[in-house]
Image (cartoon, rainbow, N blue to C red):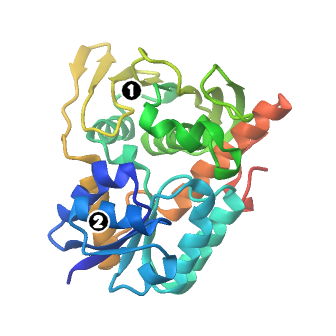
Amino acid sequence: MSVRWGLIGASTIARQFMIDAIRAQVDGEIVAVMSSSQERAAAYAGENGIPVAVSTLDALLNADIDAVYISTTNELHLEQALAAIKAGKHVLCEKPLALSSADARKMVDAAKAAGVVLGTNHHLRNAGSHRAMREAIASGRIGKPVAARVFHSVYLPENLQGWRITRPEAGGGVVLDITVHDADTLRFVLGDDPVEISAFTQSAGMANGGLEDGAMCIWRFKSGVIAQSHEGFTTKFAGTGFEVHGSEGSLFASNVMTQKPVGSVLLRTAKGEEELSFDREDLYTRSLRQFHAAIHGDGQPSATGEDGVWSLASAEAALQSAKSGKAVAIDPKLGSAA
């Protein structure tokens, strides 16, 4: 049984990654694309071999589709996801799921009530590097985890700058763009949940309108692990990385906070150093395989709607902390940061 997809948003990420990932599935097919501009939708459909191009959500949801992928600007996610869920469609939504974790919780509850699959497109937990780190930690290779560091400050390409650095009402800023990913990746790799965060944000010359283009966060997890993360849009020459330090060893991952299956992971213990091997499968292809399996009743998406609530609650708390100058508790069960 094939899974017929509709794309909500004629986006760069869909063109660069998601279209190929859907078509890489033996049962994946893209039927329609929606853009608020019919002209843009038609051009996008023509360029990407998509049969149907529409300019309204109703038209897309009335097409012969089983699932939607949402990659519009952040403030549109909630309304579009709820409409798709009401229409009985499975939903894979870009992060953040919404502009507040309370709204993200509404999406999770609606999907559960409707019996459809809701996934958050947190690509990084599909990387072989992060799964190798998670496995090494879970199997005790670094002993008891104590601390972690995430380096995820990059340079936002000109073609992506737009609303991310100019439109607060659209959910712009580096925290809702990158801190959400770091929250999810820390949770996944550590197998642990954050309970508190302190954050500083900055505007280093790229963002305007009161938005932040850099952030540094300190996290505390349930187990007692502490972590630090650096997110940014303005560092042209920075590399990305992820370190986890434990009582019996450390993991050093380089060039892994990326959309591509690249990078390396080094394990250092009393025995010396060992480079961990891991698969190099495309992150989005793996994500779509798990999403299709979930649709067919086998397991769940690699990142669920609940995972999306967690990452958004964490980002929300980071923004609250930066504004208040105080540490803020993270509690997704409340639908917002406590």
Label 1 to label 2: alpha-carbon separation:
49 Å
* Quadrant hosting residue 43: bottom left
Tell me the amino acid under the disc marked 2: Ala
Question: Is residue 109 shown left or right of residue 126?
Answer: right
Tell me the amino acid under the disc marked 1: Ile
Pick the front one: 251 or 200: 200
| Mark 1 lies on residue | 142
Is 67 located above or below residue 224 in the figure?
below
Pick the front one: 153 or 251: 153
Which residue is located at x 34 percent, y 82 percent? 65
Question: Is residue 261 shown left or right of residue 41?
Answer: left
Question: Where residue 177 sits: x, y (%)?
Answer: 55, 42
| Mark 2 lies on residue | 45
Is 181 located above or below residue 29 in the figure?
above
Q: Are marks 1 and 2 in contact (CB under 8 Å)?
A: no
* Quadrant hosting residue 320: top right
* Quadrant hosting residue 298: bottom left
Pick the front one: 330 or 98: 98
Question: Where residue 169 sits: x, y (%)?
Answer: 70, 50
* SS category of the residue bearing label 2: helix
Is 308 located above or below residue 187 in the figure?
below
Which residue is located at x 43 percent, y 55 percent? 121
